[in-house]
Amino acid sequence: MRADSPADASAQHHHALLNRRLQGWAPQQTGTLLFVLDGAKVLLIRKLRGHGAGKINGPGGKLEPGETPLQCALRETEEETGVRARSLRLAARLRFLDLDDDDWLGFIFVARDFTGVVRASDEAIPVWCPVDALPFEQMWDDDRIWLPRVLAGERLEGDFLFQRGRLLAHQLVPASADADLARLEPAPGHSDE
């Protein structure tokens, strides 16, 4: 692609727009995703309602008032799949900016152990997928960029700009080894209401 091609100009425009939108940014929603690993498989869900209905993703959802991201991830995963995740690790903090909808701050967790029996709920149909064959064509556009890295053990921070469900621009960086994980969670008493 030539540097002065229309596609390149569009990409530059979208990256500039992403960076402008991040100035003084505050999310309208805060949520979590939790990816439970069992050997070479990961527990995903087909979302039946709410944000992302019809897509495949990790269990998760919106924080309730007074709830921490960790508490939310555990609650949502148990509600949606019937399993209680254990040995959780905060793997990423991602900012999702949308030109047509709410902006989200997402906390991504990975668990390597769980108790309980996987079952469907009125919110989701759980499915175990091989880590090396994730169904990206049925997932959000950004998942193929960060999810394999998170499942491989990386810690990340990133920003994603969407319009009408389509990814326009992103930036993703490794979280430093000494990154203060506490800074990745909202202050005590944080609420989205």
Image (cartoon, grey):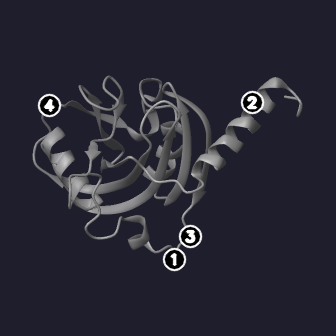
Residue drawn at (47%, 51%), measured in percent from left and top? 94
Q: CA distance from mark 1 to mark 4?
A: 38 Å
Whichever of labels 2 and 1 marks the residue nearer the N terminus, that label is 2
Disc 1 secondary structure class: loop
Q: Secondary structure at mark 4?
A: loop
Residue corresponding to mark 2 = 10
How packed is label 3: few (under 14 Cα within 10 Å), some, or many (20 or more)? few
Q: Amino acid at mark 3?
A: Ser
Percent x, y for residue 19?
Answer: 65, 49
Callout 4 amino acid: Ala
Element under label 2? helix
Mark 4 closeness class: few <14, some 14–19, many ≥20 residues within 10 Å: some
Earlier residue among tags 1 and 4: 4
State yes or no: discs 3 and 4 in contact (Cβ < 8 Å). Answer: no
Residue name at image x 38 percent, y 72 percent:
182
Residue 80: % across, % down: 17, 39
Location of mark 4 (residue): 120
Asked whether disc 1 touches disc 3, contact meaning CB atoms under 8 Å apart, the reply is yes
Question: Which residue is pictured at 58% across the width and 51% down the height?
Answer: 22
Rendered view: 19 above or below 156? above
Label 1 to label 3: alpha-carbon separation: 5 Å
* Residue at 52% from the left image edge and 57% from the top image edge: 157
Q: Say above or below: 140 vs 31.
A: above
- Report which residue position mark 3 lands on: 176
Q: Which residue is mark 1?
A: 178
Q: Is residue 149 left or right of residue 170?
A: left
Count of marks overlaid on the render: 4
